[in-house]
Image: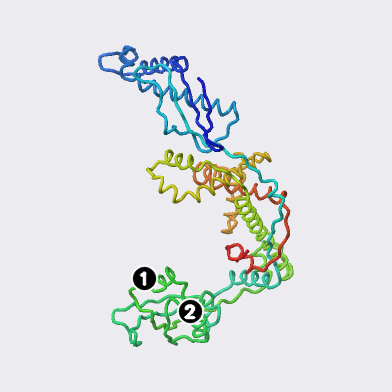
Amino acid sequence: MNVVREDLNATSAILRVSIAPLDYETQVSNALEKTRKQAKNPGFRPGHVPLALIKKQYGKGILIEEVNKAVSNALTTFFTNNKVEILGNPIPYEKEEVKGDFNNPSDFEFAFEIGLAPTIKIDSILKESFNYIKVNVDAKLIDQQVDDLRRRYGKLVASDAVGSTDMVMAQFTELNADGSVKEQGVIHSSTISMEFVENAKAKKELTGKKVGDTLTVNPADVSKGGKDTAAMLGLKEEELTSISDKFEMKITEIRHMELADLNQELFDKLFGEGIVTSEKDLKDRVKEDLDKMFSQDSDRLLTREVYEHLIEKTSIDLPSDFLKRWIQASNEKKISIEEIEAQFDGYEKSMKWQLIQGHIFKANDIKVDQKEALEFTKMLLVNQYAQYGIPAPEDKELTTSAIQVLTNKEESARVYDMLAETKLTEYFKTTVKMSDKLVSYEEFMEIANGKNN
């Protein structure tokens, strides 16, 4: 076997693989003999079919298979010995045909095109300074969280008039343009939460109303629109276009959330018996929990900022033409070059990031192994149990559950991606220069949602 490299340009090359009979004849003979022993042909005892007949029936297919194996081994050996890093996999070079005849086998030559992995240089970029955005957990935010906790353990009680955080039960009746009840129109009872009514005019009109009062509303003004409006009226979303935007809303019940008292009973429900014993302790614990929660979000924002900066600033010359042909050749479904080109910018960005991340991991000996993935999955499961207020099972049961998660291909990929991102964040936090930037919760959410820089 012999492999000769011919560079087409800086990003792609041709590999010509020469295969001689010495490279495949023994393997073909062994495969034919193995097939003969297993063959069951009428008129012959199992394992005693004449070799000539086996060769006639299966010879060409076996020859092709063994030659392909020899080619694959030759390419693998070439990449290993010459430390050649490629993108994707070798694909047949479209400008040259295979040299050789499988009907009269002798020497063969195959030509493959490869895409060369570029050299990654990011050290200077990582020396730049990045913002580490932190939420200012102030008294206002702490009080809001305390109120949320009290609301979670509070109770709904009847109220005389609609307040800004009340639940309002009402009957919605569809009206004509002149305000009369529409014949065979929509009539449906539903509940709205005043907290989530965003239309200022509608909220003002509802505030202070009592049971039995009626008012005319546009359903979209007292809901979040789309699916929420349809659900409120007992309709399918596509039916909204065929109904009026004028409804009579008759209030049938008003419920007010009475917050739980700040006492030891609530403290014990929230954090366990005796752990928090005063309102000050509660606020200290809430601040600690919020700081911890937001620190994880701050880490994600840092990683996102560094990622975007690396993608923008890192110069990487990719073998774009080769990659398009490789995507087309390796795709399970038939796809045209035009379709690939329409989506190629996103693919190229993804490939660029994979190369940058791979470089960081290799240069810093960062690895994600099975043991770490198992422990990470167990931690994710414990967090899930905690979210539902359920104690985590014993380690043996937890390990079994984690293994089951990792046997699912999609779930396993998700876990490994999350663990890789965690390791990447740790690397960034210990490598790049960071400047703390304290912002309000509202500003933080805007930045997290990409509405602010």
Residue 268 rendering spot, x and y as whole percentages: 66, 65
The residue depicted at 44 percent of the width and 83 percent of the height is: 251
Q: Is residue 39 above or below residue 416?
A: above
Q: Secondary structure at mark 2?
A: strand
Residue 319 rendering spot, x and y as whole percentages: 52, 41
Pick whichever, 437 or 325, lies toward us.
325
Q: Secondary structure at mark 1?
A: loop
Q: In the rendered structure, find residue 235 and report the number of the disc placed on it.
A: 1
- The residues bearing labels 1 and 2 have C-alpha atoms spaced at a distance of 20 Å
The residue depicted at 49 percent of the width and 81 percent of the height is: 254
Q: Earlier in the sequence, mark 1 or mark 2?
A: 2
Q: Residues within 10 Å of mark 1 (few under 14, many from 20)?
A: some
Badge 2 is on which residue?
Answer: 168
For residue 369, what is the image quadrant?
Answer: top right
For residue 275, what is the image quadrant?
Answer: bottom right
Relative to residue 50, is residue 399 drawn left or right?
A: right
